[in-house]
Image (tube, helix red, strand yellow):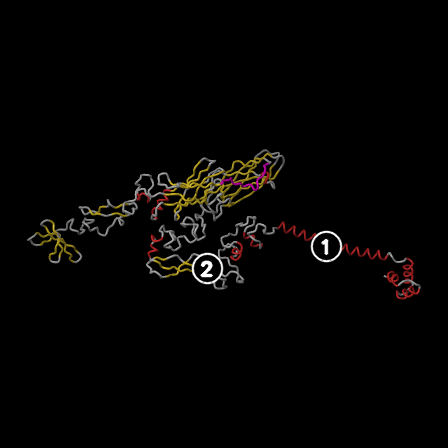
Amino acid sequence: NAGTYDGKVYIYHSDEVHFNSHEGNDYISYVAYHGQGVENIEPFCGDGSIDSGEECDTANLGSQTCSLLGFNGGDLLCTDACQLDTSSCHSSEICDNGNPLTDSNGNGIISAFECSNYDYSLSIDELTPRDENVYSYAYTSFDCEYGINQDVAISYHEGALNCLEGVIFNGADNLEYACETKRLISNKVRFGDCYVGSSAGTSTEICRVSEVCNSGENSREIFDLEVEDYSYCAEPGEIETLIDIKNIQISNDNEPGEIVDVSGEIDALLDQDETIVVSSALINLNTGSILSEDETQIEYNFEDSNDEEFELELLIPNNIDDGKYYIFTKAYILNQEGSSCRQDMYGIPKEIEGNDEGIDEDNDGYFDYEDCNDNDGLVNPGSQESCNDFLDNDCDDLIDNEDPDCAVACSTGQTRACSTGLNGICSEGTQTCDNEMWGLCEQTAEPRQEVCSDFTDNNCNGVVDENCGSSGITDTDNDGLPDQWEMQYFGNLFQGPNDDFDNDSYSNIEEWNRETDPTNERSGPVEGANLAWLWILLIIIFVAVILLVFRRNIGNLFKKRSKGSDVDPRLRSYISSSLAKGFTKQQIKQALISKGWSQKDIDKALR
C-alpha cells in the first residue's frame, strides 16, 4: 500500500508505515504506526535507498548494469541483503531470444547456429583457388563460398566461420594439411597459409563443413592443384657428368639486411680438369622468384681426389615479407649447365622475420589481412557502407542496416555527394535517400579528354595531366618508370621497375631506358654483344663498297690501256719522233691529215 503524508510518500507494511523524506542532499527514513506520531528511525535495507554498506536496495541498483560490471549482458538483480546479484548476467553473446550463446549441442564449436535449435544448415557453393599450379613446399590460399538455408543475421555468418574447414591433401605424401588461417569475407571464408606438401603430383584443396556442424545438400568442394618440384638448374637436360653437392651448412641469420652464409663441398668424377660453377639462391617457392643469389667458381683438378670446398653469401633483402624461404644450391661445368647441372635444396626452410604486410589483390591500398574482400576494390575499411547491396562495404562486420552508418536519418528524395571509388573525376557521385535509407553511390561525372595543367585526372585512367608536353616526367609511384609509359603499355601503375612483364629476361626499367616494348618479348634491348656484331657488319659493308669502287676504277684503267693498244705503231712512231724534234701536236696533226691519216686515228694516237 502507498499513500502520502505531509508531502511524503508512504509504503505500508502491515501496521507500519515506512517513507522517505528528501531534505537537501540526504534521504531520511521514517516509520509511523496508524494512529501514532511520526518519528526518525535509522536507515535499513529495503527502504529503497542505498545506504552505507549496501550495494543496492530493492530496485535501486545505483546505475549499475551487467555491462558496466564486465559482462556481455543479462539482468542485474539485488539480493535481500542489499548486495548486487550477477547470477543472471552472462559473459557470452546472446541469441535473439535473449538466451546466452553457449555450446548447447556439445560439439565443441560455439556459433550462432546454437540459437536456432539446429534448424539452420551450411552448404558449400564454390571453391575458388588462388593458384592452379604450385611448387612443392609452397603455401597457397583459396576462397570457400557457402550458403545458409535461411536468411540470417551476420552473427550466423560468424558461426559459419567456426564450422568451415580448409585443408590440402597431398596424394604423394598421403597427408592432409590444415590451413593455418581463415577469415570471413562477406559470404565466403578465405583460407590462408595452406601447405601443399613436399611431393610433386596432385594436391587437393578441400573446403568442407565440420562433422560436428549441420551441413546441407553439399558439405564439401574440392580443387586439384598441379604440384611440381622447383628447378634451380636452367633448362636441365640429360646429365652426362657426375657432380655431387655435399655437407651444406646454413647460418642462422634470418632478418632483413643480414647475410646468410652458405658453405659446402663439391665432389666430382670427371675425366679432365674443369671449371665448376657453384651458385646458391634464396628462393620464394610460393612465387618461384629468386630473392638473393651468389656464385663462385672452383678449379677441378682431375688428378686430385679431394672434395672442393665453397663458401657463398646471400643478402636478405630489406623489403622481404614474413615467411618461409628455401635455399637452393647448384653446381655445373662452366658453359655446360644444361648437361651437367646438379642441384640441392636445404631441407629446413629459412623463416625470415620481414615485413608482415600482406597481399593487396584488388589494389585498393588495403592488404588482404585487413581487407574483408581483397577481390573488390570498392570494399575495404576506408569505404562507406552502402545500405542496400547486402555487402559489408566498410569491413566492420555489419551489413547494410545493421551498420550504424545506415541509421543516418534522411528524407526520401534527399541527395548527398559520395565517392564511387573510381579514378579521377569518375569518383564523383551522388546518393539518393529512399525509404529513409541512403542508396548506392551513382557516378555523376564521365571521363573526358585530359585537360592540361588542372592537376586533375580528367580521363579517369589514374594519371594526372599526362601527354601535356611538360618538360618534366610524372612518376607518382616513384618507381623510376614514368606514369605515361606505364599507362601506355600496362594500363596501370602497378608494375615495378624490376618486374619482367613479357618474360624476355629484361626488366621494365631496362626496357624503358632502351625504349623497347615491355609487353613484347621480341622487343628486348640490344645488348653489347649484339652492338658489336652490328659494328662488325657495318665495317664489312664499308670495306666491300671501297673494294667495289676500286675495282671499277682499275677496270676503267685497263679499258683505257686496251683502247690505246689499238693505235697503229707507225702512227705512234711518227708522233713520238715529231714531238722529239720540237713540233707541236697541232703541227703534227695537220701533217698527218695531209698524209691521209683519219682524224679519229690521229686523235687516238695523240692521247
**Label 1: how many Cα within 10 Å (few below 14, some 14–19, many 20+):** few
Q: Considering only vertical position in the picture, is 432 above or below 116? A: below
Quickly name the residue at label 2.
424
> Is 160 on the left or on the right of 52, as rendered?
right
Quickly name the residue at label 1.
545
**Label 2: how many Cα within 10 Å (few below 14, some 14–19, many 20+):** some
> Is 41 on the left or on the right of 279, as rendered?
left
Q: Secondary structure at mark 2?
A: helix
Mark 1: amino acid: Val
Tell me residue 175's x, y (percent): 44, 36
The residue drawn where x is 46% and y is 59% is 424
Q: Quadrant of residue 277?
A: top right
The residue drawn where x is 70% and y is 52% is 540
Which residue range is magenta in the image?
226-239
Mark 2: amino acid: Gly
Q: Considering only vertical position in the picture, is 141 above or below 363? A: above
> Is 192 on the left or on the right of 581, as rendered?
left
Which dot, 2 or 1, sits closer to the camera?
A: 2
What is the number of the mark on residue 447?
Answer: none
Asked whether disc 2 touches disc 1, contact meaning CB atoms under 8 Å apart, the reply is no
Tell me residue 520's x, y (percent): 57, 51
Which residue is more in the foreground, 543 or 305? Answer: 543
Tell me residue 350's x, y (percent): 47, 41
User: How many badges with numbers are in the image?
Assistant: 2
